[in-house]
Structures are given as C-alpha cells and as structure tokens.
Image (spheres, coloured by chain):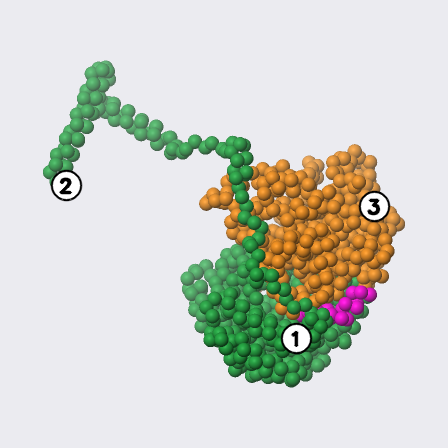
C-alpha cells in the first residue's frame, strides 16, 4: 500500500467512525431516556450498545430471508403454443445415400454349400453352415414330422403354454451334449446375448469385455447399466492390466459382481480367445466368465463341443455359456447353458425369454437332430478342420490382402494389407472384390458390414464361412479366383 | 381405469404383507443357517443379491406350477397339458408322461393358424424342403432368399405401407429398430403399459424417455406440450425428434389404442407415431389389417408400423413397415437385419400363406370366416362374462379379456381349479401387472366353437363362485360397454 492509499483508508475509517459516533450521539440525545444511563450487570447501556443491538436485529432479519430468486413465471399457454409451432423436428431418417440402396444377392435355393443366384449355380461361402447340414435328410425329416405335429409357431411365451415338450427335450439334449447341468432356449440368436447379459450384470457391477465383441453383446452390456471396461481385442496382457487396475482401484470390487465377457470365435475378426489364459486370470482375480460360443459349437474341439473342449478346460469353469444356433446347428434360436442356479435365474429375469414367444417347435427338433447328426458322424468335424486349413493356406498369399483370423477359425477373415485411408473407400474396394467374385467366378462371399450403432472398430474385411460340405475343388476354386480378382482390383490400390 | 373396491385392496395388501413377512422370516433363518454352514462362494459376489430374487424365491416358487405348463400338442383350441409333480414343495417340477386334454384359453392363436392348416402346412413343408429350416446367414450376407423378398412385399401390401422389413423375432424387432431410428437428443413418449420389448428398445436407444398415462390422449398432449416447451433436459435445446409409441391392443388390458385421437395430437405437435400391432394385426379389422382398419385411421398417418407374426399368423418373427426410404435406411443400419440370422424360410412361408388365406387369395372364404368368428367369439364371451358379474377389462372386438382377481391367493386358486376342470388359462401377476391388479387373461381364438365357449363359461363361472371373484352383481349396468368406442360399420 502506498501513502495515498493509506491516507484514503484512514480518512474513510475516520468518516465512518464519525458517522457512527454522531448517529449514536444523536440517538442518545434523541432518546435521552433514563435507560440511556442505566447500568446492567455493571455495564453502561450507552447509545452505541443500542445501535449494535439494532444492527444485530437487522443481520438476523437479513439472514432469515431466502436468497434472491428471479420470480418464477410459468409459460403461458400462448407462449407454449408458439414454442410448439416453432419447433421443427429433424426428419425421421437421414438422407438416403447411394450405398444404402445396394441390395444383397437373392438366393433361389437353399443356402447350402452350393446355391443358385440369378439362375447361376455358385459356391456359397456366405452361410455359417459349418457342418454342411443344410438340406440334410435327417434334418428335413425331423422338421417335417414336427411341423405336422405342432404347426409352425408356438403362439405364446414359455410361461403361457408356449412350452412344448420338444423345448424341454432340446434343453436337456444341449445340456447333455455339453456336459452342463441345465440349459435354456431362446427364440432368437441375437436375443440370447442381449437378454442373458442384463439378467446377470446389473447396475454397479463390473464388466470387462473385449473391444471386438459383436453387437448383441454390446447391446446387452449397454442395457445392463453396469460399469463396462473394454480391453484390447484378444490381448491377454491388456486384459490382465485391466483386471489388475480395476481390482486395485476399486476398494469395493470384492463385494461387487465381476464378469469377463469374451467370444470363443470372434464374429468380427475370426480370432479365437485363449481360454486357458482367461481362466487363469479369472481365477486369480475372481471374475466370472461369460462366453459366447456361437461360432465354436460344432466347430472347435475333437467332437465339436466348442472352445472348452478345444482348450481342454472343464466347462464348469465357465460360469455362463451362450450361443446362437443359427450356425453349425443349421437351425435358429439360441441357448444359454451353465449351472442350475444360473439357468433358473434366467427363466424369470431374462427379458427376451420371458416376454417373447418361444422358439417354433420344429426349430427345436432341428437342433436336437443336428446334435444327433454331429454325434453320429465325427468325420464332419475332421472334414471341416481339413477344409479350414486348406482355405487358410490357399488364401494366405493374396496380393493386397492378409488373413486376420486364427488358423483354426471357421471364418477366414481377409483384410486389406494397406488401408486406403477411409473406412468407406476400404469398404467400397472390398465390395468390388466380392461383387466380381460372384459375377465372374461364381464364388459367393461377403464383406463384414457394420451398423452405425456398432461400437466395434476393428477393420472390416472379406469373410469366408468354411463348411464341412465344401469339396476340395470348391476350395481350390475359392482361393484361385480370389488371387485373380485381387490381382485385378487391388493392383491399382497400392 | 380400474377402480379397486376398498375392502379388496385392503385384503390384497394384507395378503402380500403376510407373504412378505413370512418370506423375510424364512430368509432370516436361512441366513443364520448359511452362516453356520459357511458359504461356498469363494470370494465371488453372489449372482443375485439379497432382495433381488426375494419375489422369485418366496412368492413365485409357491405357485410356479401355474406358469410354464408344458404342452405336447400344437397350441390349438384344445391342448394336451403335460402334468408335472413336485417332491420338494413346488421348488422343482418334474414332467410326467400323463397329459390332460384341456380347452386352451391362453395361447395367442387368434385366427387359429397354430395347428396344421390345410392350405398353409403343405406349402410350409415344401418350402422347408426347398430352403431348409435355416439360412445360417444374416439378411445382408447370404440369408436373403426369394421367399424373404416375397414375404416383405406381401407384408407391406397387407399392412398398407410402401415397404417392410422382416426379422426373425418380434422382441428383437422392437429392441433393435428403436435405436436405429432415434438416439441422443431425441425424445420417446411411451404409453405407460407398453411391452417390455419397447421399453428395452427405448432404453437402448439413448433417447430421453417420458411416459404418458395409459391410453390417455389428453395426458399425451400435455406431456408433449411441456416437453417441447422445455426442450432437452439441462441444455434446453430443442429436441431433435419426438416419437410417440403405442400398441394396437394392450395385451394385459385387452384395450384398443385410442389411435385416431393420438394420431391427431401427434400430427399437431409434429411427433412421429410408432405403432406396435403385435396383438392387433390379423386379429381385428374387417380384413384383418389391424387397429388402423378397425378405427379408420389412414396408415399414411402412422410413420412406423410394427407387428409380430407369433400371434394371429401362427408363425414367428416381426416386421417393420414404413415408407420406402425408412425401410432402405433401416436395412442399412438395423442390427437385427445386419447381424441376426434371417427368418427361417418355413416360418416365412407360413406368414405368406396365412396372409393369403386371410385375404381370400387361396380361393376360399376361410379367411373372412375366421375373422368373423374371432369377432363374434370375443364379443359373445365378453358379454357373457360381464353378465355373470366378473370384472372384465378391455374393449369390444378385442380377443383379449382379462378377468380381475386382485388377491394373490386367488391366482393359483383360479388357475389350478380351472385346470382340474380341463380349462387351460393364463394368470398374470406382478411384475407383468401392478402388484394389486393380478388377473386371469383369456385369449379367444377363431378355432373355438360355440360349445367350447359354453363349456369354458360354465367352468369359469363355477370357479368364480368358488373363489369369489364375481366383484359385480350378476347382470350389472356394464359401465365398460357404453364407452367402448368401437363399432364396426
Ligand atoms: C439362496 C436361497 N436360500 C434359501 C432357499 C430356500 O429356503 P427355504 O428352504 O427356507 O425355503 C432358496 C431356494 O430357492 C435359495 O435360493
Ligand atoms: C406388444 C408386443 N410387442 C412385441 C412382442 C414380442 O413379440 P415376439 O413374441 O414375436 O418376440 C409382444 C409379445 O408378446 C408384444 O405383446
């Protein structure tokens, strides 16, 4: 503070003092009552005490007042009318772009290993008919019997006379096949994941999921409102770090339910989850495991029992196994299997099970028959494994493309060696390849497509679904044609 | 609106209170027992915590034999109900080989397509042989067959919209379509009694969800006005879009949607209308085209029409119908189209054939007869029930008619007594209905004959007397009948 400020300060203080003094004097004078000179408990009640008392009252009064709020005036009806009139909604959908208009090829016969498109017979690599049992005689026979006996639909959810004896037989069959105590059928593959997950994961629970999981799982996780943490795709180091961090940071973690969610064979990449390592981590950090076996049941393991058999892990170690039956089993619907407690809980808490009509009985019959076929003919699995390795080898040195999938995965997944820089032009390039394969080479394969709602950001690619029903010449044709087309289309690309 | 008698409310509360107290009592001893035995969780948190499954353990398990009864026949007018036994006080039920032949008042088999049909079944089996039960592929990959394209054209034509998209499950249709249509910054205004699939879809979309009083257009209007004026929460920016979601027939109430009023309000406030016709498509309307046809609403005024094939058509799957652009967009974004196995070809054929029968394109008038029958049956059954003094909910012409039970003890009593007299009925309680409003639900079918209905009425009447659910005097003034808004030309 410099001198002038001090001076100003002093004068101000002085002025205030004077004012108070004169005011008290004035009041003393004005009242000049006997009380002004009274002495209470030895204290002279002078005028200034009176002023202090007054100030005290004023402060109390001010404190008792609410803080200032602008007066609340609700909108009048007229104002609301105006607002409603002014409001312009966005259109229901964004403008249609050219790529939304493309239509998928239409099949004119069953989606077996060979099918008919535009009147031409093509080799089908677009159906996850891993065991090649589409059109299998036994399958058609059991469906015919079932359709004649039960009709098509079940006309009700499981709780309300929608439970048909074949459903119970099918659940028992699946449990017996996989060696679990019980299982539960869902009426649609997709709904299995987004219903079963929220039945177990609730608000506050911790879920560690692979970033490459399919949309059904993503949706289930979102609906569960749990705390979700993603780890790097199929990267066990990342999983371990995440588990470590979560357990360390969250003191309450021990009291919460904790889950790891992985897929056996990833739909989005064809990678296979290293189950031994996941089990080791799960047991170390005490997490439960939810495993999606949609693309591994009927494929992996010496008898097609899935990833657990493939990795020689007892299935009891996996708490909840889910799978869609629209792949190797060549039917529809899905199931979840595990301990009796896990299954019984879903029968009342799983929304897609409780609130939806049950699986059409003929599809349950088909599932039973498919498992019977699988058990009766182990060569299906050997064939499939042989076919996978032939195609994997054949496709391993394609110009401009590399294999992203595991060498035992039934989905052989090719992605661009070098991205063009944008997802859209990558996709366009891949679409070109696929289109030429169909038109010029009569090979039907597809690209992986991503919905705008899908959070997975693994690169897109071309998928070959290998089947036990493909012949060697089919496979040779498949990779030879790919070599030719890739040479034409991708040459200019890089 | 349901007005529950005072004394009934009191006894119902008392019953639930008693059940709750006993449940807690047992849980208490169970806890002591568990503690003494030591737990076997080995460091994992239990799959369900404390009160999460209290209702299941202590209330549901006692009466679980009334739900999920297996059948060993198609869900037609008569079904074979498989008997079950329990050796542990109803905690687990074992199937036996005994069946009892029961009249089925539970399945959503409105038009009687559940059982084998002379026109549909041969075609279904042919399609199954031609296309196999599954395509093992998604619609955008290799799962689109000629049958699928035919089905979509057929459905679009039937519901009266330019285009349609079909998926393999009704539930997934709702829960995967809603997130594709609306997202953050959008507002969903949903009827308070909408189906769980809609609730799930709305929640999954990330849009703000508001609820209006069940089937009350005036409340819908005030919710709309308030929300448009307020804008988005906290930021107060205007909403991107508003979607009002209603159902054609409410499956737990049997009520028809007040669609004309709701559509008018949505038009006035520029909100999009999403109509779920799961129970109404095929079942009502002069040619079975659902609630729009019955109530005279132009389908062009309903932006998104959704429905399922699990009810009237006796198949499986769901559809979305809308403008060409909307369907094109959905085919590009909807996860149920991109990631789910396409609808099973024989099921698709069943739908196509059923629609042909309904429209008389099979060369017979069986479809028209079925439609006339379901309407007659529903109105007959409803009025007879009301005459007997039951409290029956819902509107005329609706094939769904709930009978109020209220008291929790009356749920198993009604269900078991009816089953004893060979009548398969559905009872619903919390959480599908509010706690106090437990009910039995009758779903009629065109497959029921007059004799079937008379038998059913006899049984229901005698059981009703036995357990005391005739809350009105016989032949009452029938207040519900007067305000039923619907009369077909
Ligand atoms: C966790 C738990 N505790 C206890 C019980 C059964 O208890 P009580 O034997 O007292 O009916 C059950 C039965 O389902 C249960 O799940
Ligand atoms: C209104 C409504 N929407 C959707 C569904 C689900 O249909 P689905 O049984 O085909 O899954 C139902 C079924 O009960 C329903 O009542």
**Neighbourhood count class around disc 3 (C-alpha, 10 Å): few under 14, some 14–19, many 20 upward:** some
Chain of the residue that carries numbered disc 2 in the rendered image: A
Residue lying farthest left?
A3
The mark lying in front, picked from 1 and 3, is 1
The residue that disc 2 covers is A1
The residue that disc 3 covers is B376
**Chain shown in orange:** B
Q: Quadrant of residue A21?
A: top left
Q: Magenta residues, as a range?
A: B122-138
The mark lying in front, picked from 2 and 1, is 1
In the drawing, does residue A266 fall left or right of residue B360?
left
Label 1: which secondary element: strand
Instruction: State whether residue A171 is above or below residue A350.
Output: below
**Neighbourhood count class around disc 2 (C-alpha, 10 Å): few under 14, some 14–19, many 20 upward:** few
- Residue A329 rendering spot, x and y as whole percentages: 68, 72
Quadrant in the picture for the N terminus of chain A: top left
Looking at the image, is mark 2 or mark 1 earlier in the sequence?
2
The residue that disc 1 covers is A124
Chain of the residue that carries numbered disc 1 in the rendered image: A
Label 2: which secondary element: loop
**Neighbourhood count class around disc 1 (C-alpha, 10 Å): few under 14, some 14–19, many 20 upward:** many
Instruction: State whether residue B17 is above or below residue A44.
Output: below
Gap between marks 2 and 1, in whole Å?
90 Å
Q: Residue at the location (64% across, 58% down)?
A: B172
Whether residue B133 is in magenta: the answer is yes
Q: Colour of chain A?
A: green
Gap between marks 2 and 3, in whole Å?
98 Å
Asked if disc 3 is less than 8 Å from ligand 2, the answer is: no
For the residues bearing labels 2 and 1, Cβ distance under 8 angstroms: no
């Amino acid at each position: 503070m410099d001198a002038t400020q001090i001076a100003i300060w002093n004068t101000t203080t002085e002025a205030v003092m004077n004012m108070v003094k004169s005011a008290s004097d004035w009041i003393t004078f004005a009242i000049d009552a006997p009380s002004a000179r009274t002495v209470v408990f030895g204290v002279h009640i002078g005028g200034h005490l009176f002023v202090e008392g007054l100030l005290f009252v004023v402060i109390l009064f001010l404190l008792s007042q609410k803080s200032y709020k602008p007066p609340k005036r609700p909108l009048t009806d007229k104002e609301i009318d105006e607002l409603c009139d002014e409001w312009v909604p966005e259109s229901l959908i964004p403008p249609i772009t050219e790529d939304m208009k493309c239509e998928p090829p239409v099949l004119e016969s069953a989606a077996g290993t060979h099918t008919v498109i535009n009147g031409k017979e093509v080799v089908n690599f677009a159906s996850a008919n891993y065991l090649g049992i589409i059109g299998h005689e036994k399958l058609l026979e059991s469906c015919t019997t079932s359709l004649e006996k039960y009709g098509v639909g079940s006309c009700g959810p499981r709780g309300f006379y929608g439970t048909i004896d074949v459903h119970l037989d099918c659940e028992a069959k699946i449990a017996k096949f996989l060696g679990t105590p019980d299982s539960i059928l869902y009426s649609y593959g997709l709904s299995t994941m987004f219903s079963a997950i929220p039945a177990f994961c609730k608000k506050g629970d911790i879920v560690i999921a692979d970033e490459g999981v399919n949309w059904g799982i993503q949706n289930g996780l979102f609906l569960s409102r749990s705390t979700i943490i993603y780890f790097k795709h199929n990267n066990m180091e990342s999983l371990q770090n995440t588990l470590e961090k979560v357990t360390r940071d969250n003191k309450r973690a021990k009291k919460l339910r904790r889950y790891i969610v992985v897929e056996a064979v990833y739909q989005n990449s064809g990678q296979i989850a290293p189950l031994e390592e996941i089990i080791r981590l799960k047991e170390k950090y005490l997490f439960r495991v939810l495993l999606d076996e949609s693309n591994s049941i009927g494929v992996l393991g010496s008898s097609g029992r899935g990833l657990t058999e493939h990795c020689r892990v007892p299935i009891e170690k996996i708490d909840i196994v889910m799978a869609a039956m629209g792949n190797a089993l060549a039917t529809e619907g899905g199931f979840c299997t595990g301990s009796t407690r896990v299954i019984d809980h879903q029968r009342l808490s799983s929304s897609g099970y409780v609130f939806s009509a049950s699986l059409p009985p003929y599809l349950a019959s088909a599932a039973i028959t498919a498992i019977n076929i699988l058990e009766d003919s182990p060569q299906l699995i050997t064939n499939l494994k042989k076919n996978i390795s032939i195609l994997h080898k054949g496709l391993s040195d394609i110009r401009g493309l590399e294999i992203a999938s595991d060498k035992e995965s039934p989905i052989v997944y090719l992605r661009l060696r070098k991205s063009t820089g944008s997802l859209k032009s990558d996709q366009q390039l891949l679409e070109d390849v696929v289109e030429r394969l169909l038109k010029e080479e009569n090979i039907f394969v597809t690209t992986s497509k991503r919905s705008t709602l899908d959070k997975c950001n693994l690169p897109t690619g071309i998928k070959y679904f290998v089947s036990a029903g493909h012949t060697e010449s089919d496979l040779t044709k498949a990779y030879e044609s790919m070599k030719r087309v890739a040479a034409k289309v991708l040459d200019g690309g890089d | 609106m349901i007005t529950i008698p005072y004394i009934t409310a009191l006894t119902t509360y008392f019953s639930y209170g008693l059940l709750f107290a006993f449940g807690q009592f047992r849980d208490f001893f169970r806890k002591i027992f568990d503690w003494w035995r030591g737990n076997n969780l080995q460091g994992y948190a239990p799959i369900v915590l404390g009160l999460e499954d209290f209702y299941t353990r202590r209330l549901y398990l006692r009466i679980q034999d009334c739900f999920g009864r297996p059948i060993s026949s198609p869900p037609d007018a008569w079904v074979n109900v498989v008997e079950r036994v329990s050796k542990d006080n109803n905690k687990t039920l074992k199937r036996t080989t005994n069946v009892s032949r029961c009249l089925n008042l539970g399945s959503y088999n409105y038009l009687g397509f559940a059982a084998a049909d002379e026109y549909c079944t041969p075609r279904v089996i042919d399609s199954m042989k031609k296309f196999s039960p599954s395509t093992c592929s998604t619609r955008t990959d290799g799962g689109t067959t000629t049958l699928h394209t035919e089905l979509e054209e057929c459905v679009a034509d039937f519901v009266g919209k330019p285009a349609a998209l079909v998926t393999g499950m009704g539930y997934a249709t709702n829960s995967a379509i809603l997130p594709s249509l609306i997202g953050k910054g959008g507002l969903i205004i949903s009827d308070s009694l909408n189906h769980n699939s809609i609730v799930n879809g709305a929640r999954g979309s990330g849009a703000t969800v508001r609820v209006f009083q069940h089937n009350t257009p005036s409340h819908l209007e005030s919710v709309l006005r308030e929300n448009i004026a307020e804008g988005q929460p906290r930021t107060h920016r205007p909403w991107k879009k508003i979607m009002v979601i209603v159902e054609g027939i409410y499956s737990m109430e049997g009520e028809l949607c007040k669609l004309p009023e709701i559509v008018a309000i949505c038009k006035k406030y520029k909100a999009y209308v999403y109509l779920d016709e799961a129970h109404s498509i095929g079942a009502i309307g002069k040619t079975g085209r659902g609630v729009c046809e019955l109530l005279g609403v132009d389908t062009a005024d309903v932006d998104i029409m959704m429905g399922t094939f699990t009810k009237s058509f006796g198949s499986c799957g769901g559809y979305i119908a809308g403008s060409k652009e909307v369907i094109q967009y959905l085919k590009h974004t909807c996860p149920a189209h991109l990631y789910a196995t396409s609808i099973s070809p024989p099921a698709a054929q069943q739908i196509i054939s059923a629609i042909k029968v309904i429209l008389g394109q099979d060369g017979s008038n069986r479809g028209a007869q079925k439609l006339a029958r379901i309407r007659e049956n529903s109105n007959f059954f409803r009025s007879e029930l009301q005459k007997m003094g039951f409290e029956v909910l819902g509107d005329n012409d609706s094939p769904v008619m709930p009978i109020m039970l209220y008291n929790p003890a009356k749920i198993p009593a009604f269900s078991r007594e009816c089953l004893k007299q060979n009548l398969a009925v559905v009872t619903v309680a919390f959480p599908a209905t509010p706690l106090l409003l437990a009910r039995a639900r009758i779903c009629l079918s065109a497959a029921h004959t007059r004799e079937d209905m008379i038998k059913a009425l006899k049984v229901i009447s005698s059981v009703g007397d036995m357990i005391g659910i005739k809350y009105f005097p016989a032949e009452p003034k029938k207040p519900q009948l007067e305000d039923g808004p619907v009369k077909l030309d």
